[in-house]
Image (cartoon, rainbow, N blue to C red):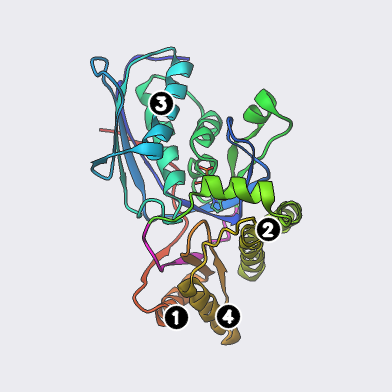
Amino acid sequence: MRTDRHTSATAVAHPNIALIKYWGKRDEQLMVPCADSLSMTLDVLPTTTTVHLAPEAPADSVTLDGSPARGEARQRVVGFLDLLRERAGRAEPAVVDTRNAAPTGAGLASSASGFAALALAGAAAYGLALDRTALSRLARRGSVSAARSLFGGFAICHAGPGSGEAADLGSYAEPVAAPAFDPALVIALVDPGAKAVSSRSAMRRTVDTSPLHRAWAASCAADLAELRAALPRGDLDAVGEIAERNALGMHATMLAARPAVRYLSPATVSVLDGVLRLRADGVPAYATMDAGPNVKVLCHPADAARVADAVRDAAPGCTVLTARRGPGARLRTE
Ligand code: 2P0
C-alpha cells in the first residue's frame, strides 16, 4: 500500500544487546541469519534519523553524525534506499541525516539502532505503509540485529525456514513478553574507537573457516530454549549464565577462525575478572560482549552502582553507563 502524504520523516531507535547472539548469515544478499537470536532493547544511546525526499537532487545525500558518510557506510545506506524505492515504485533521491548517541562502529550496536531508525523513517518518507513485522523484516536487510530494535524490551529474531524468498519472509523479529524481568545492564566502554574488522567480514570469515562455528550454532538453539523458559520467571542467574556462555562461545568461534578474529582486549578481560569477583562476593552479575572490546554486565538494578564501581576499578578510565529495558523504534511527530 502506498500513501503520498509524507515526504519527510524522523525516527528514533535504540540499540539492543543480544543475550543469544547472531553470528553468521546463510544468505548475505538477503541478510538472512544462520540462527535465531534474542535481545534486550536498551533505553540509552539512541539513533535519530531523518529521511527527506529530494526530487531535484542528483543523488542521495547521507550525513552521519554531522559529516558526509563515505565508503561502505554510505553504500549500505544508499543500498537500503534503493530497496525502499524499489518497494515503493518511486525514484526520488533522499537526504538522510543520522545522529548516534553511541560511538559508531564500537560494538555498541549502532547499526541495529541505525537501520531500525532508517527503515522506519525511510518507509514513512517513501509512503510505504508497513506493519511492525514487515518493518522488522525490512530493517533486517540493512543489518540483521536492526530487525530486533523495532521492538522494545525483549525480542527474538527468527532465522526463518528455507532459502530465497521463503527465508526472506520468515526472518523477522517479534517481541518476547517478560514483564517480570527488568534488569540493569552496566555498559563498560573500554575502547570507544572504531573496530579493526567489521562484523560483516568477521562473521563471514568465522562461518567459512572456524571449525567451532557449527557446534556453537547448535548450542545456540539449546541456549535459546533455556533462555525463553528463564525470562518470564525473571530468573537473573539463569538468564545471565546462559547469556554469558553464549557470548563467550561466540568469541571462541571467532578466535578459531583462520586468521583469528579477536575483539577482546586486555581491558575486556580485566572487566570479565571483575565480574567473576563480584559473583564470588555474592553479587549476581553476568557479562556479554559483541563485535568489540566493550563489556555489558547484566545485574539487578539495586546492584548496578556496585557493579559500575567494580567495572571502573577493573578498567580505570573506561566510560560506564547503566541501561534498562528501552522502547521500540518510533516515528517522531513534528
Ligand atoms: C548480535 N552482533 O546478535 C550480534 C552479536 C554482534 C555480536 O549483530 O552484518 O552489525 O549488519 O547483520 O548486525 C553485529 O552485527 O551485522 C551483531 P550485519 P551487525 O547482536
Query: Does residue 180 show up magenta in the picture?
Result: yes
| Residue under numbered circle 4 | 276
Q: Nearer the viewer, mark 3 or mark 2?
A: 3
The amino acid sitting under disc 2 is: Leu
| Residue under numbered circle 3 | 81
Q: Are marks 1 and 3 in contact (CB under 8 Å)?
A: no
Q: Nearer the viewer, mark 4 or mark 2?
A: 4
| Residue under numbered circle 2 | 227
Residues shaded magenta = 178-193
- Closer to the chain start, of discs 4 and 3, is 3
| Residue under numbered circle 1 | 314
Please state the horizontal and vertical placement of residue 290, each as a whole percent of the image: 53, 58
Estimate the spatial distance between the alpha carbons at disc 1 and disc 2, rounded to whole Å: 28 Å
Estimate the spatial distance between the alpha carbons at disc 3 and disc 2, rounded to whole Å: 36 Å
Q: How many C-alpha atoms fall within 10 Å of the one at disc 2: few (<14), some, or many (≥20)?
A: many
Any part of residue 176 in sight: no
Asked if residue 280 is positioned above or below residue 286 in the image, the reply reads below
The amino acid sitting under disc 1 is: Ala
Q: Secondary structure at mark 4?
A: helix
- Closer to the chain start, of discs 1 and 2, is 2
Please state the horizontal and vertical placement of residue 262, each as a whole percent of the image: 55, 62
Asked if residue 134 is positioned above or below residue 308 in the image, the reply reads above
User: Measuring 64% from the left and 56% from the top, which residue is drawn there?
Assistant: 257
